[in-house]
Image (cartoon, rainbow, N blue to C red):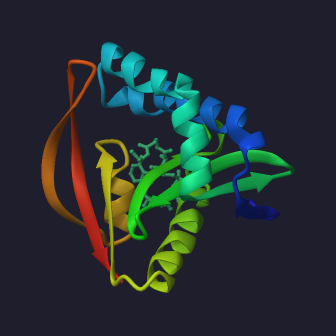
Amino acid sequence: MIEDINFREATQDDLPEITAIFRDTIRAVNSKDYSEKQIEVWSSGADKIKTWQDRIKKFYFLVAEIDQQIVGFSYLKNGNYLDGLFVHKDFQRQTIASKLLRIMESRVSMNGFDTIKSDVSITALPFFDSHFYEVEKKQKKSLKGLVFENYIVYKDL
Ligand SMILES: CC(C)(COP(=O)(O)OP(=O)(O)OC[C@H]1O[C@@H](n2cnc3c(N)ncnc32)[C@H](O)[C@@H]1OP(=O)(O)O)[C@@H](O)C(=O)NCCC(=O)NCCS
């Protein structure tokens, strides 16, 4: 059970830790649901430094920390669109994502929306299901010529 967990907004200095979590979690956790090629292409998104700098600058971007180590992150786009939620591969199933999601849902309400939306991986669907998200549709997304299946989900707050 985790005790001293802290949440704060990300800064540009966090970029190396955030992109490392993105890369390593996809390779270690999402790899059970996607092909080797898909994992390679998806995790290489960690190298798009400018994209990550912009996300930290423009979005509501939170990190979760334990003993000053970043163990998860999430960011919200356009007020009510949860665009990313990743937990460090060595800290899975310790309620970190649930805690991040709760903060994001409160933020969405504070932003004046009554629905939160996201598109989520096959891997993350059971997590969102356990938080009472509904599937709007299953979709196919194209990335560097590869097709990825995922789900558009939403929850009325
Ligand atoms: C999905 C993810 C964010 C969940 O993070 P987490 O911190 O491990 O989740 P929590 O510990 O808060 O899980 C809470 C509940 O969600 C459900 N859940 C979470 N992961 C699950 C899994 N792999 N399979 C089934 N149920 C799961 C369970 O009910 C769990 O409660 P329990 O552990 O008491 O059974 C994490 O697995 C992850 O980083 N996945 C890879 C990245 C990803 O696909 N992100 C989604 C955006 S595309």
Quadrant of the image containing the C terminus:
bottom left
Q: Quadrant of residue 37?
A: top left
Is residue 80 positioned above or below 41 on the image?
Answer: below
Q: Position of residue 145 (x, y in %)?
A: 21, 18
Q: Position of residue 79 (x, y in %)?
A: 43, 70
Is residue 101 positioned above or below 115 on the image?
Answer: above
Task: Residue at 35%, 42% (x, y): give it.
Answer: 123
Q: Position of residue 153 (x, y in %)?
A: 25, 61
Q: Position of residue 3 (x, y in %)?
A: 79, 64
* Viewer-closest of 56 and 24: 56
Q: Is residue 134 visible?
A: yes
Is residue 75 positioned above or below 42 on the image?
Answer: below
Task: Residue at 38%, 19% (x, y): give it.
Answer: 41
Q: Is residue 1 visible?
A: no
Task: Residue at 48%, 61% (x, y): give it.
Answer: 76
Task: Residue at 54%, 47% (x, y): give it.
Answer: 55
Q: In this image, 68 relative to 44: left or right?
A: right
Q: In this image, 71 relative to 45: left or right?
A: right
As drawn, which residue projects farthest toward the right?
A: 67
Quadrant of the image containing the N terminus:
bottom right
